[in-house]
Image (cartoon, helix red, strand yellow):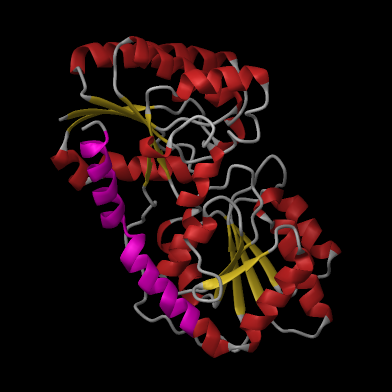
Amino acid sequence: MRVLFILHMPPPVHGASVMGEYVHRSKVVNEAFECSFVNLSTAHGLEDIGKVTWQKLKAFLLLRKAIRNKVREFNPDVVYITPNSHGVAFFKEYILVQMLKAMKQRVVMHFHNKGVKTRQDNPLYNFMYRRFFHDTKVILLAGALYEDVRKYVSHDNVYICYNGIPDTPFHNGNMEVSNTTPRLLFLSNLLISKGIITLLDALEILRDKGYSFTCDIVGGETKEMNARQFEETISQRRLESCVYYHGSKYGEEKQQFLNRTDLLVFPTYYDHECFPLVLLEAMQHGKPCITTNEGGITDIVEHGKTGIIVEKKNSTALAEAIATLIDNPSQRRQMGQAGRKAYEEKFTISVFEQQLTNILTTCYD
């Protein structure tokens, strides 16, 4: 079976591109199918995402030509594509999907984002979505995300494939940490909608209540907030003695932060949030997660078992959840152990590879 994979690969580094790279390198996928790959990315960095430039327009025209030529040469049985659900990128990928359909291709669309439901009442989007989703199969990251596309896709044409990540050789093999002061970790780029300001407000509440803690902030600068601005925000809240910004960290350096933390705090309300890999990374390391009911997160974190789900944008509720786990080391340990077990059962890269292979093999039977 010949499969043409049209997917995002780094750069830039984000959830969809990371998973695209996993698919590209997957021995399971490459042995199951005769594969050909095309990189869907036209942005060179996170700051380029959503921008319209002449360089990106030229890159798109070359991409469209390359895909058309690849389809003619490779003659795939199935075309797998990872489109966006709205915005400039959606319009780009709408053109590509319509071109593939005109070329009589069987299309499987794997969504790593959401936002269809919030735009389905717009006449232009509604018209385009009807054509876009017609006669295609759709892979979603979690069952909770079906509501986003329900208007356009029947349940029979939807498949669920959880993201997975490879186990890391940098894992220290020990879920226990010996921090005398509880250590928290926020692991994401400096986007306000990832909950970074909500977290700082919660930490301010905890400090004023007399709690002792340290919080490591690990993630890249963005156009919303650079390092200097973030340090100023920390200073304004008088948190500089307990909150530390470390910038972007990858590989072993990132794993060291996960190894030594007591719990991950990720209070996201990001519009595009679907299945954040950072939660899988924390569970892989046996760390409890405090997060929100955004996207497919409730398919990852089980409230009260592997972590705590709090209301979005609610710093008071977030502070209470953090205080609960600071006050109860045994509960942190139990949640971390349950998280590691859930990771091994549902969120490894091998489980993901097998799920994806099964879907592509059977979806057009």
**Residue 354 inside the magenta-drawn segment:** yes
34 sits to left or right of 232: left
* 344 up-or-down from 3: above or below: below
- At 44% from the left and 61% from the top, the residue drawn is 280
- At 64% from the left and 47% from the top, the residue drawn is 270
27 sits to left or right of 280: left
The answer to whether residue 48 is visible is: yes
* 287 up-or-down from 62: above or below: below
Q: Position of residue 310 (x, y in %)?
A: 66, 66
* 348 up-or-down from 65: above or below: below
Q: Position of residue 351 (x, y in %)?
A: 28, 56
Q: Nearer the viewer, residue 52 or 241?
A: 52
* 43 up-or-down from 318: above or below: above
Q: Which of the 4 image quadrants contains residue 86?
A: top right
The answer to whether residue 240 is visible is: no
Q: Considering the image in quadrants, where does the N terminus appear?
A: top left
Q: Position of residue 297 (x, y in %)?
A: 53, 57
Bounds of the magenta span? 334-363
190 sits to left or right of 107: right
Q: Position of residue 263 (x, y in %)?
A: 56, 74
**Residue 102 inside the magenta-drawn segment:** no
Main secondary structure along the magenta-highlighted residues: helix
- At 25% from the left and 31% from the top, the residue drawn is 364
Q: Considering the image in quadrants, where does the C terminus appear?
A: top left
334 sits to left or right of 272: left
